[in-house]
Amino acid sequence: GNSVTQMEGPVTLSEEAFLTINCTYTATGYPSLFWYVQYPGEGLQLLLKATKADDKGSNKGFEATYRKETTSFHLEKGSVQVSDSAVYFCALSDRRGATNKLIFGTGTLLAVQP
Amino acid sequence: EAGVTQFPSHSVIEKGQTVTLRCDPISGHDNLYWYRRVMGKEIKFLLHFVKESKQDESGMPNNRFLAERTGGTYSTLKVQPAELEDSGVYFCASSQGIGTGDTQYFGPGTRLTVL
């Protein structure tokens, strides 16, 4: 079945460091891919998404490119801030018939230190 | 526009008791989903409503879990009787449609602890 594999955390970085969180997927067909973020004490928020191969999603300085050849959707940011500290979840849409559930990775905790 | 809301934010109950979680989706969203995250693992799908109908309940763990969506508005998820392994964070999400352009918007979650 469809699945998402995400790099283990926690990831600890200093402010202004470069961030990469790896995400690979297994899927039949062509799912949409997502990164969700959960800030402390808050719910899940959509960070960015890509709906087809070679699409690049971007938001708040974060980027991820839908790579079909490597089945990957790695999240990157050039310069992280303390306010980026959160749990990041990679997900794909599993659309079958009239339902479209999300399949998530385990989440990666990012801690950015000043 | 109000987002997805969930109540309560936290619930602590003893094994064998009953708990009911509530989710209010974004107004006008026909699609409502329940997910849960257990013990820091991945977030897993439980079920999907379209209006008041259960479209997909393949993720429901067992018959101790009962979800309803009366009138196609808010939804409840009842766990009866609760077991220790039911502890986790229960998320609700809603979307307008199920196409590639439709985003699932999540609520803040209900943290359930079963002692």
Image: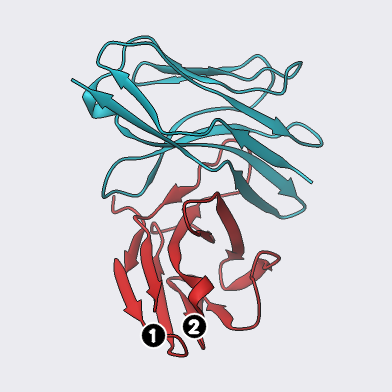
Q: Label for residue B82?
A: 2
The colour with which the image depicts chain A is cyan
Check if mark 2's residue and mark 1's residue have beta carbons within 8 Å. Answer: yes
Left or right: B84 in relation to A67: left
Camera sees residue B3: yes
Left or right: A114 in relation to B9: left
Residue A69: x and y, percent?
76, 16
In the image, the chain rendered in red is B
Residue at 53 percent across and 78 percent down: it is B68
Q: Name the residue that disc number 1 marks.
A: B14
Left or right: B23 in relation to A34: left
Camera sees residue B8: no
Q: Closest to the observer: B70 or A102? A: A102
Number of other residues with Cα within 10 Å of mark 1, as a class: few under 14, some 14 to 19, many 20 or more:
some
Q: Closest to the observer: A87 or A48? A: A87
User: In what element is the residue under mark 1?
Assistant: loop
Residue at 36 percent across and 65 percent down: it is B111
Say which amino acid is labelled 1: Glu
**Could you confirm whether marks 2 and 1 are on the same chain?**
yes
Q: Work out whether mark 2 precedes mark 1 in sequence or the reverse, and give the earlier one.
A: 1
